[in-house]
Amino acid sequence: MQRAVDREIRRNPAWFDQCWLIHDQPAWDGAAARRFARNRDRVWWQHYTDVAAHMRERDGSLPAQNESSRARELYRWIEAQRRQHDAGNLTQDRIDALDKLGKWLGTRRGNPDALWASRLEQVQRFHAARGRFPVYTPQYRPDEKVLAIWLHRQRTWERKGRLRQDRHKQLDQVVPGWTAPNK
């Protein structure tokens, strides 16, 4: 460590003085540190403010993915909010705030809950017919891809504690043993 510091001092003599200047400053008190800390709630509202400003500048249109790099970030944030809403993890105050923006849910192909129920039924029929769960192996079973990915996503959400309780109960009732991946 000492050699690295000595090497940096030889390269840039002012570097060591800058280090001392930084370390000679008094430490922040706890209140100041908390005031400047970024927490999830503050970050969420900052993103919301950025999306609202973007929409005001563009006559109420949502950010587009291909518009600019900043618009792409906002677009992805809106998509994340849609996923949180579909999973039932978005709080009511955030839903109300997003509703003030306009049609933030965007155009969807059908109802997400109906699609989920349809996939559950398809997995149940598949399991009943073949005695196993769908597996995604593109070379041998390309027809199982959609169901295998859907079931894998449910397992992932369950493992991370993000799967809605009602959906977890439905999966347990309709396809017992769904949490165990295929070997």
Image (cartoon, rainbow, N blue to C red):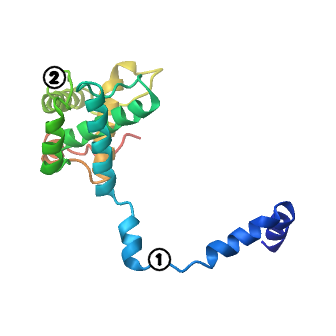
Amino acid beneath label 2: Gly
Q: In the drawing, what numbered circle is on residue 110?
A: 2
Amino acid beneath label 1: Trp
Q: Where residue 73 sits in the image (x, y, percent)?
A: 40, 36
Q: In the drawing, what numbered circle is on residue 28?
A: 1
Q: Residue at image x 19%, y 31%?
A: 105
Is residue 175 shown to the viewer in this render?
Answer: no
Q: Where residue 88 sits in the image (x, y, percent)?
A: 17, 45
> Residue 122, relative to residue 34: is it above or below?
above
For disc 2, the neighbor class at 10 Å (few under 14, some 14 to 19, many from 20) is: few
Q: In the drawing, what numbered circle is on residue 2?
A: none
Quarter of the image with the C terminus in it:
top left
Instruction: Give the residue at the far right of this rendering.
Output: 10
**N-term mark: 2 or 1:** 1
- Gap in Å between the C-alphas at discs 2 and 1? 52 Å
Q: Residue at image x 18%, y 35%?
A: 101
Q: Where residue 99 sits in the image (x, y, percent)?
A: 14, 37
